[in-house]
Amino acid sequence: MIQLDQLSKRYGALQALDGVSLNVPAGCLYGLLGPNGAGKTTCLRILCTLLAPDAGSVQIAGIDALADPRAAREQLGYVAQEVAIDKILSGRELLQLQASLYHLDAATSRRRIAELTELLGMGEWLDRRCGTYSGGMRRRLDLASGLLHSPAVLVLDEPTVGLDIESRAALWQVLQQLRDDGTTILLSSHYLEEVDALADRLAILDGGRVIAEGSPESLKRDLGGDRVTLRVREFATPQEAQQAQSVLQQLDGVRQVVINRAQGHAINLVVEGEGAALLDRLRQQLEEASVPVFSLAQSRPSLDDVYLQATGRTLMDAELASVSSRDPKAEKKQAMR
Amino acid sequence: MTVAPAAQLSQETLALTKRLFVQLQRRPSTLVAGVLQPLIWLVLFGALFANAPDGLIPGGVSYGRFLGAGVIVFTAFSAALNAGLPVMFDREFGFLNRLLVAPLRSRYSIVLASVLYITSLSLVQSLAIMAAAWGLGYGWPGGAGLLVVLLTLLLLVAAVTALSLGLAFALPGHIELIAVIFVANLPLLFASTALAPISFMPSWLGWLAALNPLTFAIEPIRAAYLGQFSLNAVVLEAPYGSLTAAQCLSALLILSAALFVSIRPLLDRKLS
């Protein structure tokens, strides 16, 4: 349904996308996972014809979006990251405006607005001015305007950022229902659990490249081995962690040892084998090497481990690193015409 | 989607125009301020020069009657100069992106909506000022004169709207746009024949006034108010020669066309 082929985009010195290819099958809820600055928004902006790529091709429902952007837009509903609404208009007036921009006739417009009001629970406040809405209401209104023309493809850029838990759960449910009704959905997120719980398939984006692609289960399964998290103290110093790391690397059955700075220098291990026996063995080995143990926990691989495996750092670390290097001014300039 | 392209174009343009009018209706301060400011000019300047010696204004007209045409043009000019502001806010707050992901038949409907909105707004404000001037005893252009006034205002508004929309897409933000509007507004008024005739000015200012597009709008309207309007009558004694009403209006037409042509590549780039 969506085919991106070898997309590249550069902003000055920054290579935002470096040969991104994606294939989203029809009726699929597809997740685009990656830290801030990975290129997710750029990718979605190109898909939605807001931005021209330097190279590559975009196909939506068989339409070449670069050659015929207008036809592609008919197929697309786009829910942007920064919620742009007109504070003076009521939600209903905004939807009516949107309906006219998609050339719906009056009857269809009324019917769709009524349907979406029902689906998204907007009845109570739709006739109030948008300026009075909470974050959750705005997001629902935005989703409604993306869905108004019953698009074949729905694109959402970080739809749950800043939402309370209840609104987030409600949004997840709506998205799953839409997918079950046949809408193809592409959503970006930097929340692991979100993509893990929602997506049928996903691509992990990092530094403008796709570093992993598949269903959440297959990605985790392919990684193999169990994960063990060791804390030598509740908040260990880097030195303590490094000491423990050098001991752990010598142990049998330990494939990889990474210090997780975001978790107070906890140590993430990839180990062969499974089960409680493994933990017992490990605990014993640590005791022999006189490495203190504050806690030791075992888990199945997660999407974070998939990211860790591919990039050598956790998603949280990448997220923290990107926060300090973000340039809001440049980002605004990229978004502005 | 069986609607004809022309119907789609008018559907999207009307919806976008309606949005601007709903905004105006709920936040009428721009409308009110746009009438209030010229009204203050009219009353204060009218009073200031009420006792001016006879013969100050060529043709023996009272200063109030002289001033009326200038303030009417200033009203339309100020309103049109703000044409770019809604567009600029849409650019800055991302609303424009919402419009651009929609399958608009032509993205010029966004520009067209602004033009329709600002033209009607500035004409309404000008008519309010004309009514006020009439109330103050400064006259009213009869019959054909009213048509001349409206046509002249339309030409000026078109030119200034094009300029403002061009700035709205060229400048980085609304602070810069407001700064340009602020800086352009009063000097253009003073360097025109709105407040004083050219004969009254030092020669360098006379030259500026004679080249100022506001003057090309003011003088035909002034002639219409005096009831002596004819396309071939000389309405402006400029340092470089005499201009007829037809020449003034042609200059405005050419200016509007030139401005629309020159902002077109910018609009194409920003809206593509």
Image (cartoon, coloured by chain):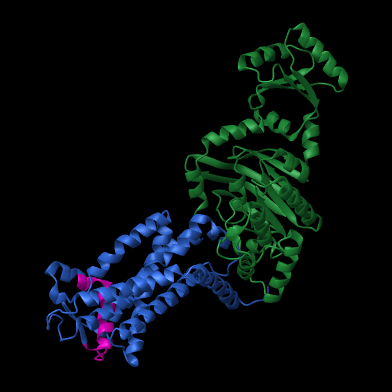
Chain colours: A green, B blue
Q: Position of residue A307 (x, y in %)?
A: 69, 33
User: Does the magenta portion include B217?
Assistant: yes
Single out the residue that lies furthest toward the bottom. Answer: B143
Which quadrant is home to the N terminus of chain A?
A: bottom right
User: Does the magenta portion include B94?
Assistant: no
Q: Is residue B263 visible?
A: no
Q: Is residue A115 visible?
A: yes
Q: In the drawing, does residue A57 fall left or right of residue B252? A: right
At a point 66% along the width and 16% down the height, the residue shown is A241
Tell me which segment is drawn in magenta: B209-233
Q: Main secondary structure of the magenta part?
A: helix
Vertical position of residue B190 compared to residue A190: above or below: below
Q: Nearer the viewer, residue A269 or B29?
A: B29
Q: Position of residue B256 (x, y in %)?
A: 35, 73
Vertical position of residue B197 compared to residue A160: above or below: below
Q: How many marks?
A: 0
At a point 73% along the width and 42% down the height, the residue shown is A195
Q: Quadrant of residue B45?
A: bottom left
Q: In the drawing, does residue A132 fall left or right of residue A303? A: left
